[in-house]
Amino acid sequence: MRGYTATLATGEAIYYVDRKRWLWTMSVLYPLQPLLGVWLHAATGAQAWLLLPLFLGYVGIPVADWILGEDRNNPPEEVILQLDRDRFYRVLTFLVVPLHFVALIGSAWWAGTQSLSWWAFTGLAVVAGITSGLGINTGHELGHKKGRLERTLAKIVLAVPVYGHFWIEHNRGHHRDVSTPDDPASARMGESIYKFAFREIPGAFRRAWAIEKDRLERRQKSVWHADNQILQSMALAAALQLGLLIAFGWKMIPFLLVHNVFAWWQLTSANYVEHYGLLRQQDEHGRFERCLPHHSWNSNHILSNLVLFHLQRHSDHHAHPLRRFQSLRHFPELPTLPSGYFGVYLLAYVPRLWFRVMDPRLLALPHINGDLGKINIDPDKREKIYEQYGNMSDATS
């Protein structure tokens, strides 16, 4: 297995091996999970197999995360540059792009050509949508890089979930406004995921469109110009979905509607848990402090990180957006989720349970210490939250 050598400031020579090097291929193969259900259905005739990816994702992976635990190991800072430059990891993000298309087209083919019950058809559309939502994660990893090829691949893969505005909104909007009341992609304390979705999805698109409009106008071009990067990805998405409709018939209309909604829901779920209630403070001039590691919720759970290109080490990502997934680091005393993303998604889908688990965890963070003034609170719930918790920092000081 390949290793990396470096010399510490003390003069000591080190040799580092990424023991998860080949395990990262799980992030490449995981989007093919709908086809596993299709194959088992074809082999057995049992339609329930089409729902297997739901069980694997929302039961199997959280259980595996609980059993395997966390990995808090970091690559030494001295080898980060070598690790980032290792082409192996870059190739993995290239390879997964066509597999997102394969998974969607394969699922659509099966839904459009087989005589499925209504629940199996709907279930397959949900599975395909959730899996296409992983394409946003792939676009996230690629879209943060400076190379033209990677940014082009980001626009291409974002056509699968029909979310072509994401990498513009995320890079130039979310990273600027993260963990502030101005960010539609940062959830507020007391805000349910369902309320958040109605703020986040349209808000993110409006912000992306405004950013791209401003870029084009500075170049003396109309927002409808062919150089509009949102429209480029959306045109590919339209061609893909129109092609599926032509190939497999009217069944694709409900299939793709369900697919698109659940693909978007995957991003909403991730955004909701990544910055819930966290708030950057303002100085006397109203400027927000720069984003620090404690402005993101993290998880070091092993399996869910291996299938998500290390997305759950979110603090280091915001601190170093260009850093590649294999190099992201763990920091001590960070806001930490009780499980990997798949487990906490389920928690978030039951708001009362989410608030019961996460609100005390939020208030107990060292940099908050019960001070509600240091929390991003839903304005509609502010009075209720203050009545429930008061200013707990007074009691702990």
Image: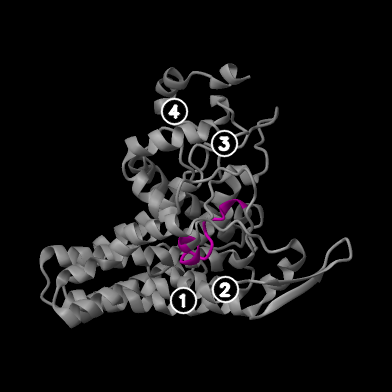
108 or 78, which is in the foreground? 78
Q: Quadrant of the N terminus?
A: bottom right
Name which of mark 4 and mark 3 comes first in the sequence.
3
| Residue pointed to by mark 3 | 279
Residue at x 61% of width, y 52% of height: 318
Q: Is residue 394 above or below residue 239?
A: above
Give the class, few, some or many, for how many residues have Cα within 10 Å of label 2's Cα (few <14, many ≥20): some
Magenta residues span 303-315
Please state if 315 lies on the left or on the right of 25 as rendered: right
Name which of mark 3 and mark 2 comes first in the sequence.
2
| Residue pointed to by mark 2 | 150
Q: Looking at numbered disc 4 in the image, what kind of residue is underneath it?
A: Pro
Name which of mark 1 and mark 3 comes first in the sequence.
1
Task: Report the disc number at residue 379.
Answer: 4
Cα separation, mark 2 vs mark 1, equals 12 Å
Q: Quadrant of the C terminus?
A: top right
Residue at x 41% of width, y 65% of height: 134
| Residue pointed to by mark 1 | 96
Q: Residue furthest front?
A: 67
Name which of mark 2 and mark 1 comes first in the sequence.
1
Q: Looking at numbered disc 2 in the image, what kind of residue is underneath it?
A: Glu
Cα separation, mark 1 vs mark 3, equals 34 Å
